[in-house]
Image (cartoon, helix red, strand yellow):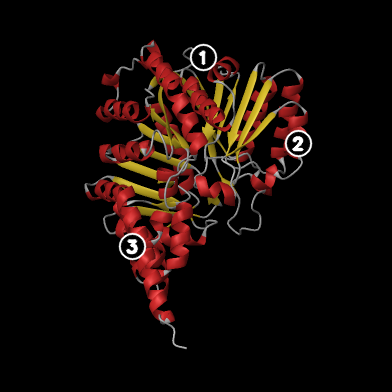
């Protein structure tokens, strides 16, 4: 018996329907063109996998409950920000700073509502031992509240001492809360330490839990990538470091120990960082806003130093691409020197153009990236950009002292970005991140000095040798680049 339809015809028809359906949806959602084209390329090449991937990861779906909690948070959040704008700490003398700083401040206020706050003291901490020792000391001094938020919490070494310190804090009556990303910290959440903390009275919350059922309502790969510690509402930490001891973390990844830096912050900007953390806590729990403000030590802080700090959160809802826009403005404001450190470098077209533009107009641009990273696809995609950058004079330095994880940009040693965001499209478009934009020559010089120390362990990428690399290698890198908007 002859079939009314030949199997090949059916497959072609199904393929065409998938392409048309996804294509129409992509057009209506209106992502940036490079992202749209990447999705269409994947669907045409692998229709079944492409359709499943788009339904799972293609749109920034937050889920109904999270969207409702965000809406509930908006009015009190904006009211608090209006109050901060009227304070003396928000009155910065912009005439004493580079011209671009005032414009960056206005952009940050427009995008995230948070103004630059003056009068802060920033201590730059480098290396896991120094960072964890400082946090441990502050945890042991906590009197009223302790809130910690990390993408990854991993057992072993000094990280176990942190658990002991938090248990001690809870035992003396400190209200302790730990918020970790459900995916990034999945191994730790499945171990015994969270239960030990809960038994001591510590609230341990898994942010943005994943699963096949949740994937129907919310995109599973939208992650909370922030790293924040706030003690008594007086002291805050943020930066690139997860709650891990590098000696015990990803030892089989063959990339070396992770190299990080954090900032210990005191002054008015602590309130802004605390507000970011408590907002995430609100989204992941059922606590009321008035309870959160009352129990979170969220209050105005006195001046502790001279640094001007603007706290910028970003994510798939609310603040959107705030960090990306601020970075672009920094790069276009550069006049003499830019040094960038990032573990994962997969820029979008706007970021690539801004870096090339700086180098082309005579700015000395240095990009420091680790020689080895823990993602093979990201490694190949990242290297596909090197030739374009070196063609206009960007110096690319390959760091050989481990997986350099510090995320920093310093412009003319006067404007600095420091925080949790990588220079890849995942950080700049999808993840929940937080960065400090610091308009202060002293901090800019200290962060620049740290970058210079990183350069001592670097090998420059030779442009001529890079152009001669084997054709198969170039092909793999360029293929990986096609999927860079989806990484």
Measured along the vertical axis of the image, is residue 49 above or below residue 174? Answer: below
**Could you tell me which secondary element the residue under label 3 belongs to?**
helix
Residue 7 position by quadrant: bottom left
Q: How many labels does the image show?
A: 3
Mark sitting earlier along the chain (1/2): 2
Distance, label 1 to label 2, CA atoms, is 31 Å
Q: Mark 3 points at which residue?
A: 20
Circle number at residue 370: none
Q: Is residue 192 left or right of residue 120?
A: right
Quarter that holds the C terminus: bottom left
Which label lies toward us, 3 or 2?
3
Q: Is residue 39 left or right of residue 128?
A: left
The image position of residue 383, as x and y in percent, is 41, 60
Measured along the vertical axis of the image, is residue 386 above or below residue 316? Answer: below
The image position of residue 378, as x and y in percent, is 46, 58
Mark sitting earlier along the chain (1/3): 3
Measured along the vertical axis of the image, is residue 120 above or below residue 35? Answer: above
**Could you tell me which secondary element the residue under label 1 belongs to?**
loop
Crowding at dot 1, Cα within 10 Å, few <14 / some 14-19 / many 20+, comes out as some
Q: Which of 225 and 24 is in front in this view?
A: 24
Q: Residue furthest front?
A: 1
Crowding at dot 3, Cα within 10 Å, few <14 / some 14-19 / many 20+, comes out as some
**Could you tell me which secondary element the residue under label 2 belongs to?**
helix
Which label lies toward us, 1 or 3?
3
Question: Residue sitting at 21 percent across and 47 percent down?
Answer: 361
Q: Name the residue under label 2.
A: 195
Distance, label 1 to label 3, CA atoms, is 53 Å
Distance, label 3 to label 2, CA atoms, is 49 Å
Q: Name the residue under label 1.
A: 299
């Amino acid at each position: 018996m002859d079939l009314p339809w030949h199997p090949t015809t059916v497959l072609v028809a199904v393929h065409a329907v998938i392409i048309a359906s996804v294509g129409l949806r992509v057009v209506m959602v209106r992502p940036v063109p490079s992202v749209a084209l990447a999705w269409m390329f994947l669907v045409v090449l692998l229709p079944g996998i492409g359709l499943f991937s788009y339904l799972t990861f293609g749109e920034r779906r937050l889920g109904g409950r999270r969207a409702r909690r965000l809406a509930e948070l908006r009015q009190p959040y904006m009211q608090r920000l209006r109050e901060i704008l009227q304070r003396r700490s928000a009155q910065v003398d912009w005439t004493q700073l580079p011209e671009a700083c005032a414009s960056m401040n206005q952009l940050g206020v427009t995008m995230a509502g948070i103004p630059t706050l003056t009068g802060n003291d920033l201590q730059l901490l480098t290396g896991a031992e120094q960072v964890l020792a400082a946090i441990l000391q502050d945890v042991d001094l906590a009197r009223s509240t302790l809130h910690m938020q990390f993408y990854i919490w991993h057992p072993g070494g000094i990280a176990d001492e942190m658990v002991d310190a938090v248990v001690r804090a809870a035992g003396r009556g400190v209200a302790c809360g730990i918020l970790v990303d459900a995916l990034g910290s999945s191994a730790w959440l499945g171990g015994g330490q969270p239960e030990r903390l809960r038994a001591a009275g510590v609230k341990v919350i898994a942010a943005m839990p994943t699963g096949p059922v949740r994937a129907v309502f919310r995109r599973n790969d939208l992650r909370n990538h922030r790293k924040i510690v706030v003690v008594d509402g007086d002291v805050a930490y943020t930066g690139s470091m997860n709650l891990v001891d590098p000696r015990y973390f990803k030892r089989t990844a063959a990339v070396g120990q992770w190299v990080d830096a954090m900032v210990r912050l005191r002054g008015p900007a602590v309130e802004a960082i605390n507000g970011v953390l408590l907002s995430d806590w609100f989204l992941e729990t059922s606590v009321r806003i008035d309870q959160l403000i009352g129990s979170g030590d969220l209050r105005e802080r006195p001046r502790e130093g001279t640094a001007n700090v603007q706290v910028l959160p970003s994510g798939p809802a609310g603040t959107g691409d705030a960090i990306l826009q601020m970075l672009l403005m920094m790069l276009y404001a550069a006049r003499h020197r830019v040094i960038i450190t990032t573990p994962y470098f997969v820029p979008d077209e706007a970021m690539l153009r801004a870096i090339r533009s700086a180098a082309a107009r005579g700015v000395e641009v240095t990009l420091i990236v680790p020689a080895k990273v823990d993602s093979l696809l990201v490694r190949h995609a990242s290297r596909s950009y090197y030739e374009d950058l070196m063609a206009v004079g960007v110096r690319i330095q390959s760091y050989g002292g481990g997986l350099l994880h510090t995320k920093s940009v310093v412009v003319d040693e006067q404007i600095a970005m420091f925080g949790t965001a990588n220079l890849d499209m995942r950080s700049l478009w999808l993840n929940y991140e937080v960065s400090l934009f610091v308009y202060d020559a002293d901090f800019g010089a200290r962060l620049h000095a740290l970058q210079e120390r990183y350069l001592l362990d670097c090998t420059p990428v030779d442009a001529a040798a890079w152009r001669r690399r084997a054709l198969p290698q170039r092909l793999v890198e360029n293929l990986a680049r096609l999927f860079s908007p989806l990484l």
